[in-house]
Amino acid sequence: MAVAAQIFVDLDSFSASAPYPLTLSGDGDGATPDVVLEGELPHGGRYLYSLELEAQRDYRFTTSGVADGFTERALLVDRGTGQVLWANAAAALELGLDADSAARFEAGWLRPEAPAGCLLSIWSDPAEPADPLTNAVPFLFEVYVDPVDDAPHTDDAVYRFFDPARGIERFTASEAVRDELLQAHPELRYDGVAFIGDDQAREGWVGVHEVLDHATGRYHYTTSAEERDALLAGLAQAEDLGVAFHVPGEPGENTQPVYRLFNPDSGTWFLTADAQEQAWLLALGSWVDQGVAFDAWVPPAPVVDYTDDAVYRFFDPARGIERFTASEAVRDELLQAHPELRFDGVAFIGDDEIREGWVGVHEVLDRVTGRYHYTASTEERDALLAGLAQAEDLGVAFHVPGEPGENTQPVYRMLDLDTRTWFLTADPIERLYLVLQGNWSDQGVAFNAWAPPAPQEPGVQPADAPAEPSALPQDATQDVSLIGLSGIDAPLL
């Protein structure tokens, strides 16, 4: 990831002490730290190190945060220019960055275009208490160096937030920034995954620059360095936030266009990878089509080699109704015959056949409202059949594990307090979004879906700890915008 902003410090502030040289060499495993500095800092003191960064290598830096009760400051600067190349959040805040920019600085990978000689400064804040016996504070600093020719590139979700009151979009590829915005800014509507890019540079890919207009609060996104420079020159209070994410430089088999529209009345840009959303805005008459802003990545569909069945989800935005099926024939029929339904792809994994220790998920149709109810409880199924005037038992829709375990994931059930509609989701972010709306009641885990173990490559030992679940949608080519949950197919401009 590129530097979040252009910040420089006075190199004379480091001249009081000679730096201790560090040698960086990658061990070929990007998951383990290659350099670990751990010890104690004198209260209000500073340690200074020198190190050399190679060109076209990925570096990541971490500190201990607040886990040890103390937040050390860490700053990496170019020894020749004084430019800040990386800072942890505590140091970035001291440099004057806001919380979002500080989080972006700390979470970013650094890939120098040319060899760089750097100074690393780690210091403590005299205002924070120290150990009364040693008059020192603990610190931890780690460096991760990725292999030159085998740097891992994971397809990253680019998330979209929208401010309905001001008509402003904001995009981020950072899960930390995403979670912070969800918690701290309830006024923003979270639209989920907008498209797929990468927070790291790739060969043939280009960076999408982010410029913030402090006068209006609008964020501008462009792959053009010339357009970025024009924005910085033309806006009175513009700030260059650096590269937000990377996308393919040219359209191809595994790309999709991201369209840009402009509203002359408000001076607002709007980006969308959804052709229907683009058409809706153009139909309003106040938006001008500016064509393709850039092309997002569409990861090739994985080859799945197991017999576990996908459970597909359809959603009716007009009525707020879900429908699930493990039948590919039913899926294809709904896709063809019901264009009013939004296809959300694979919701989770189950099986259309019974297995030992697994239970059936019953499907009950309320013909009065058209709602489908799903439950693993026969008692709840019977209560629905007895309590609904025109209920029909559609039998077992699919099977899932009867108990939670290592290879399961919870499927949550939410209740709309206004319409009394159930909503099922295996996505904790989607669940959180609904809870934040205020009119949804969290009813806990409805049942547990199957989570197939990842195939093990020959000669590769399993990790000691399970990886965090991916925030990417099961079908990454689908638009998984949550706009439909509020019954609206278009942005609330």
Image: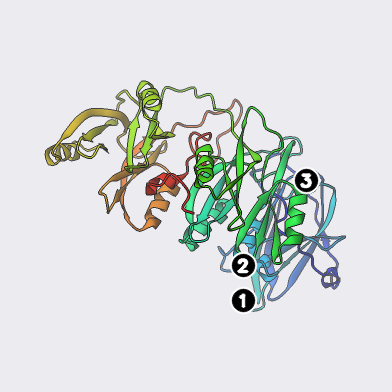
Residues under labels 3 and 2: Cα distance? 27 Å
How is this picture coloured? rainbow
Q: Which residue position is annotated with label 3? A: 25
- Say if 450 sits above or below 13 in the image: above
Drawn side of residue 399 relative to residue 312, left or right: left
Q: Residues within 10 Å of mark 1 (few under 14, many from 20)?
A: few
Q: What x and y, as percent, mark residue 239?
A: 70, 62
Nearer to us in this view, 446 or 137: 446
Nearer to us in this view, 255 or 217: 217
Q: Residue 335 lies in what quarter of the image?
A: top left
Residue at the limit of the structure toward the front, as seen here: 285
- Say if 232 sits above or below 479 in the image: below
Drawn side of residue 284 relative to residue 222, left or right: left
Q: What x and y, as percent, mark residue 295?
A: 65, 38
Report the amino acid beneath label 1: Glu
Drawn side of residue 386 relative to residue 282, left or right: left
First in sequence, mark 2 or 1: give its number.
Answer: 2
Q: Residue at x 52, y 60 (%)?
A: 166
Report the amino acid beneath label 2: Thr
First in sequence, mark 1 or 3: give its number.
Answer: 3
Q: Which residue position is annotated with label 1? A: 128
Q: Residue 259 lies in what quarter of the image?
A: top right
Residue 89 showing in the rendered view? yes
For mark 3, give the secondary structure.
loop
Q: Residue at x 87, y 60 (%)?
A: 80
Residues under labels 2 and 1: Cα distance? 9 Å
Q: Are marks 3 and 2 in contact (CB under 8 Å)?
A: no
Q: Which residue position is annotated with label 2? A: 71
For mark 2, give the secondary structure.
loop
Q: Residues within 10 Å of mark 3 (few under 14, many from 20)?
A: some
